[in-house]
Image: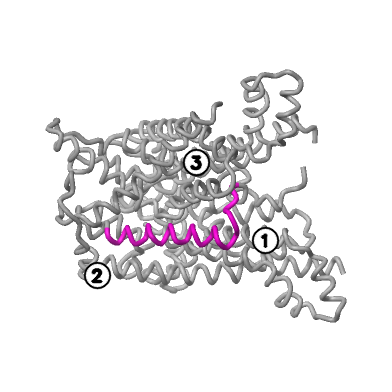
Amino acid sequence: MPRIALGAAAAVAYAVLLLAPLAVIVYSVSPGAALEIPPSGASLRWYAGLADQPRLISGLFTSLLLGAVATGAALVTGIPAALALTRGSLPGREAFLAVLLSPLSLPGLVLGLGVLTSAAVLANATGIQTAGTLLPLVAAHLLITIPWVVRSVAASLESTDPALEDQARSLGAGPFATLFLVTLPSARAGIVAGALSAFVISFGNFALSLLLASGRTVTLPVAIYEAVDRYQDPTVAAVSTLTIAAAVAAAVLTDRISGPLKTRDSSSGSGRQADPPALEPNR
Amino acid sequence: MDRSRRRVAGLLLLPALLVVAVVAAAPIGLLFRVALYPPGPVAPLTGGPELDSFAGLLSAPYPSVALRTLRLSLLTTVLVTLLGFPVALFLSRSRGLSRRIQTLLIVSPLLMSVVVRAYGWMLILGRQGFVGETLAALSLPRAGLLHTETAVLLALTESFLPFMILALAASLDRIDPDLLAAARGLGASSARTFLAVVVPLTLPGFLAGASFVLVGSLSAYAIPALLGGAAARTFVMEIYELVTISFDWPTAAAASIVLLLFASALLGGAALLSRRRSARTFGT
């Protein structure tokens, strides 16, 4: 196919991808509450007006906290799992990996309903009330952030040479010293990229959080959803623009950390639930 | 040595596996149980077990809602493939800075919340939005696409396009350039090389991408709820309202199970097809 035609098709596709975020950004600096074509000016008043939107502000802080806690927990559980999958010479490695990545292909709302039901059953059976706390959200977000950490760290570990660790051992380093001084530092890029993806995935998640968020635990995406469903006001666009800026910053940062984002890293096939290429059997 | 190594590996894997067991497997198991209670508004979750909640899914409005959801998902998959294939080809032939910028354009939207992107489409498609205001500014009759199936389809296509591009590009990147040179050396025209070599070799990427897009758009909530609303009710919207409005948890659980089983069958089928295909191609 001629390169020009391909380039034109790509330009159209990229324009489509830019359209929605651009609309939000343009509306966020609108001088009035109504959208104007052509715009009569620009104003930052809606950004200042965010201070009067307790639900959005509280949502922002809830999402930041939730993202941080989920990412921390995902690192604590995901890094050991990645080590086991790449260094453990485990039988059935592929199956374990598939199990760990499976939550990514579950419908978020259904998973949220399951977690909500479980929390209710737990409260009935033991009297432990988790409703209204961050716990169900943390558990649910942990589930969907672990895969990102495992994939990223495992890919990083696969590309480092295990011989380095053997040398450290033969030079007298204990298993823990080897782990913390050799293995983990060599997978640093994967760990940072995994943590970043985990945070971004948690921060932006909507479907899974919808049924679990209430009152003080309403996350930012849920707060935005409720706001845009009820009224049109550029304040929502202002806070949305902030998240758009954060997303672009995260993408640039990931690109810097792991070199040019390789398309193969993001999917050996399936967008999300695919094996990291590094873990695939050599074909 | 090897055995203790395996034991350590098992221990290291345990916490992550426990999370999947407690937060995914157990809740889904519980949904199975809840689905067996007698259904109804504000269902008390006693009695049964019975299959009435599943039987209830056969009556209105569920079959027509399921059909609409399926239609939207299939159309999304077709559109995403048609739009994504040339982009993936272009991307896989780009190098250096151009490739980095394109990758950024493809990946950035994935890092934005789906709610924010759906909101962007609301702003574009509404009667008081960019489309409506532009029409009005041009003294044309004001119109909008908001709260139509078309709006849902447009936003779904946009939101899943990056996945399909990445999946197809991954397959394209793996094609050995020598293979193309060989095809041409044996006298195949470039069109024939494309159709007989390139297209078949992107099949694994297509299958993985298509199954992901299908399942993802079947499970979408924010986009149909915000852009379609009452005009384009989908299966997941019904589940949400069963839980939050009619408190009919057994029916909501039954609908969830049906969706899960259908999604698993789709993903499993695509994986099987992909494996069989690569076994035939590579004889492994």
Q: Is residue B153 magenta?
A: no
Is residue B276 in sight in this rendering? yes
How many angstroms separate mark 2 from mark 1 (CA)?
A: 41 Å
Camera-near label (2 vs 1) is 1
Of the image marks 2 and 1, the number of the one nearer the N terminus: 2
Question: What stretch of residues is rendered in magenta?
Answer: A238-263
Q: Tag 2: Cα neighbours inside 10 Å, few (<14), some, or many (≥20)? A: few
Residue type of the residue flagged with mark 3:
Val
Residue type of the residue flagged with mark 1:
Ser
> What residue sits 57% from the left and 41% below the top?
B94
> What residue sits 57% from the left and 53% below the top?
A261
> What residue sits 40% from the left and 44% below the top?
A17
User: Looking at the figure, which quarter contains the C terminus of chain A?
Assistant: top right
Residue A130's spot in the image, x, y percent? 42, 71
| Residue placed under numbered mark 1 in the picture | A156
Chain under disc 3: B
Question: A40 above or below B182?
Answer: below
| Residue placed under numbered mark 2 in the picture | A54
Q: Characterize the magenta stretch by its predominant secondary structure.
A: helix
